[in-house]
Image (tube, helix red, strand yellow):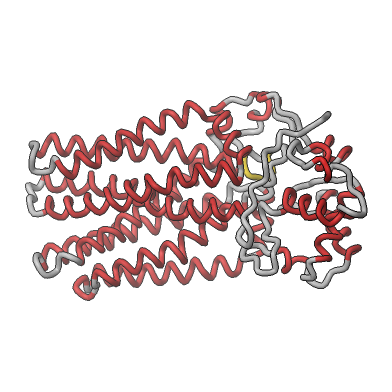
């Protein structure tokens, strides 16, 4: 029997399996991005403290380090494996593609990460216990390890959006996959955000020192304000550069919500400028609770929307522009001996080629048409759309509400013909189109 290399379906009602991965990933990114920016800031502060003999900076650095240790390396280390769990369930072939292309890159990244974890403990607990020059060298190495981790991860996740070069499909080499046209713009975008986050966290710490050391608190809050503005400027530059390097399908998706996205970014930019300006001009007006609230604002209004946009713009692919978000291989990759599964599915259908289909549903009959249609819809569509009436993300009801069966089939034919660049070009036999349309109509959206 001809089969495709599908895995069992992981279906999460209302939200969709992919969004579970996205939510976990956003929390992880907030923690991990803070760690890289903070490592750079930590090196800057240690350098300043050593060169200017500023012993008064070390208590601040210790508080910052403790926050970093708990916030980034505890929360980050919990949510990191969480991404692996949710991603492996929601997108096993996407994860498989990354591992097969970047196994040694990932292994190297783990070496850097282990050094980071050991380094952050050493930075915090060895402070004032080893000589300042040795501690300074430790902060430098810690910052380099953090940036190294970032650089390796950026190459991997940039591949998810857009392979390195067209040569990758012929060679299958890791370098052709890693060095894409958007890898370095993506790195600038992330570094800018990380620097900004290090300043935001720094203001939380400095504002909490107002009672015990008001002058030092004011000085550090001002410095953190300037650092955050610098990070915001780099982020804006990186975003503009990054957007110019994206594939056609990404721009097609961006166009749907361009006005709302630009409006959101402008509002956030004005809000951050006002906040960072306040930290520079009137630092004593910033209360620790207010400073902490800004982290939540960044997470909900900034980071979540940004990550959701990036995940959306990658559609219809999940990795390398050859694996669809519904886990179907859409093109040949000669260098990896990968063959497109679209011709086989177009000929025989999903029900006969997916190895996990129950035997009683492999052939559609009048008695099992609804059940088969539900399974087909979940396999083909649930990686992007929530199918229930109460669905939260890209709900199917908003796309086909009020349509009859023939209208829905017309959309399915259009998808199969490649009429929608942001949706998988997936041709199916007529009886499978009929089953999907029949089930969707039965939902009475």
Q: Residue 64's spot in the image, x, y percent?
A: 22, 53
Q: As displayed, is residue 174 above or below residue 297?
A: above
Q: Residue 231's quadrant in the figure?
A: bottom left
- In this orientation, which residue lies closer to the viewer: 232 or 332? 332
Q: Quadrant of residue 276?
A: bottom left
The quarter of the rendered structure image containing the N terminus is top right
Q: In the image, what residue occupies the spot 57% across and 32% down?
A: 177
Image spot of residue 424 (x, y percent):
75, 48
Q: Is residue 224 left or right of residue 440?
A: left
| Badge count | 0
Q: In the rendering, at what x and y percent does residue 324 appear? A: 69, 43
Q: Where does the image place residue 402, in percent across and percent down from the top left?
A: 82, 72
Up-down: is 348 above or below 82? Answer: above
Residue 341 lies left or right of residue 262; in this view the side is right
Q: Residue at x 73, y 39 (%)?
A: 356
Relative height, residue 236 to residue 339 (above, below)? below
Quadrant that contains the C terminus: bottom right
Q: Residue at x 26, y 35 (%)?
A: 141
Q: In the drawing, does residue 60 fall left or right of residue 233?
A: left
Q: Which residue is at the front of the view, 427 or 286? A: 427
């Amino acid at each position: 029997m001809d089969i495709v290399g599908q895995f069992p379906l992981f279906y999460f009602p209302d939200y969709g399996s992919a969004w579970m991965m996205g939510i976990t990933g956003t929390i992880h990114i907030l923690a991990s991005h803070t760690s890289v920016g903070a490592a750079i800031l930590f090196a800057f502060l240690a350098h300043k403290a050593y060169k200017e003999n500023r012993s008064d900076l070390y208590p601040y650095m210790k508080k910052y380090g403790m926050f970093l240790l708990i916030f980034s390396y505890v929360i980050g280390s919990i949510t990191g494996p969480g991404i692996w769990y949710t991603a492996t369930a929601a997108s096993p072939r996407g994860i498989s593609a990354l591992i097969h292309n970047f196994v040694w890159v990932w292994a190297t990244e783990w070496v850097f990460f282990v050094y980071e974890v050991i380094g952050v403990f050493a930075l915090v607990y060895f402070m004032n216990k080893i000589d300042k020059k040795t501690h300074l060298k430790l902060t430098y190495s810690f910052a380099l390890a953090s940036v190294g981790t970032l650089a390796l991860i950026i190459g991997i996740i940039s591949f998810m959006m857009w392979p390195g070069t067209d040569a990758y499909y012929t060679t299958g080499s890791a370098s052709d996959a890693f060095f894409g046209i958007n890898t370095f713009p993506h790195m600038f975008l992330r570094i800018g955000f990380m620097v900004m986050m290090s300043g935001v966290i720094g203001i939380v710490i400095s504002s909490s020192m107002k009672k015990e050391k008001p002058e030092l608190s004011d000085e550090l809050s001002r410095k953190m304000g300037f650092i955050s503005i610098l990070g915001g400027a780099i982020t804006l530059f990186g975003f503009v550069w990054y957007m110019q390097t994206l594939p056609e399908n990404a721009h097609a998706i961006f166009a749907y919500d361009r006005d709302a996205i630009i409006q959101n970014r402008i509002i956030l930019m004005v809000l951050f400028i006002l906040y960072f300006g306040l930290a520079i001009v009137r630092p004593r007006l910033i209360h620790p609770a207010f400073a902490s609230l800004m982290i939540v604002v960044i997470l909900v209004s900034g980071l979540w929307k940004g990550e959701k946009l990036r995940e959306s713009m990658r559609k219809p692919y999940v990795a390398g522009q050859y694996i669809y978000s519904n886990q179907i291989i859409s093109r040949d990759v000669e260098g990896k001996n990968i063959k497109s599964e679209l011709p086989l599915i177009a000929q025989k259908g999903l029900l006969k080629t997916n190895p996990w289909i129950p035997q009683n549903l492999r052939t559609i009959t009048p008695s099992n048409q609804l059940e088969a249609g539900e399974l087909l819809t979940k396999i083909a569509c649930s990686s992007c759309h929530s199918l229930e009436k109460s669905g939260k993300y890209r709900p199917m009801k908003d796309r086909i509400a009020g349509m009859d069966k023939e209208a829905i089939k017309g959309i399915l034919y259009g998808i199969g013909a490649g009429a929608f660049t942001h949706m998988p070009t997936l041709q199916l036999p007529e009886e499978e189109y009929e089953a999907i349309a029949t089930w969707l109509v039965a939902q009475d959206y």
